[in-house]
Image (cartoon, grey):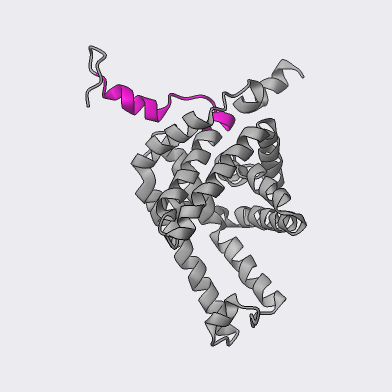
Amino acid sequence: MSNTNKHNLPPGMQTPYNFDIKQILSRALELSKRNNWTLAQVLICIILVTFAIYFIFIDAYGITNIEDLITENNPLIVSQQATIELTITCLLAPLWAGVAMLAINSYRGLKVNMSDAFYFYKQIIVLAAASVILSITFTLGLSLYVLPGFYIFTATTFALPLITDKKMRPFSAIIVSVKMVNKYLPKMLMLYAIFIVMFIPVLLSFGFAYLWVGPFYFNVKAILYQDLFCEKEKDSIESTKESNVGETGVFDA
């Protein structure tokens, strides 16, 4: 590979990345102290919009007994269920990309607020297309076995940020994400396995723990994205710590 081509590669491809899971989680924890509520508000919005879309379609389909939707007597036919899922995937794609970018920009030291997540609706066509592709491949992976679906979810995790931040096309973003994840696949799978375990408290708390686990997950992604795909900048978390150190070098709590 020529030096020119190597220079065009993202940092995570040019030089080996020190994929220290413990350090990454620690940095994400510090970042969550700054932006947890901002990200949580967007995630709450996503949940509310999801329920709203479901209820609109259920009413349109004339379904009166909602309890049947979670039983074997589900009144929705395959085409109706597919229509609902496709609508949710397309309409929420910009918000999923938005919450990811809020975490990334927060890590970069930029001031963010909930309304920033809606900025990416101007890219709804390309984000919706990418999300549909990802949803189909993920569903196919799960239909084979659980592990292929888990791999696809992990390998394509950076696709939406690459579209919004680097202005890549959907297929290009997916390919670049897969190549990067494959380079560090064992550690990436271990990291995402940790998040699967972390979602157990979410289920036990009837979803309330997601208000912390969700933002923390996106902050981990933000740190990895910045480290692997972007030119190295001064860590905003470390900068914050250093700003609390006096001239004598003693930490000022």
Q: Nearer the viewer, residue 162 or 223?
A: 223
> Could you tell me if residue 9 is visible in this image?
yes
Residue 121: x and y in percent read 52, 56
Q: Residue at x 24, y 16 (%)?
A: 250
Q: Nearer the viewer, residue 239 or 216?
A: 216
* Location of residue 157 with respect to 81 vertically, above or below: above
Q: Residue at x 54, y 74 (%)?
A: 54
Choose top left, top right, bottom left or bottom right for residue 68.
Answer: bottom right
Q: Is residue 236 magenta?
A: yes
Q: Residue at x 48, y 66 (%)?
A: 49
Most extreme residue toward the top, as rendered?
A: 248
Left or right relative to 213: residue 243: left
Secondary structure predominantly adopted by residues drawn in magenta: helix
> Could you tell me if residue 113 is visible in this image?
no
How many numbered tags mark residues here?
0
Q: Is residue 187 magenta?
A: no
Q: Nearer the viewer, residue 68 or 180?
A: 68
Residue 158: x and y in percent read 60, 42
Residue 185: x and y in percent read 67, 35
Residue 135: x and y in percent read 67, 57
Residue numbers of the magenta segment = 226-245
Q: Quadrant of the C terminus?
A: top left
Q: Residue at x 53, y 81 (%)?
A: 66
Left or right relative to 151: residue 87: left
Q: Quadrant of the N terminus?
A: top right
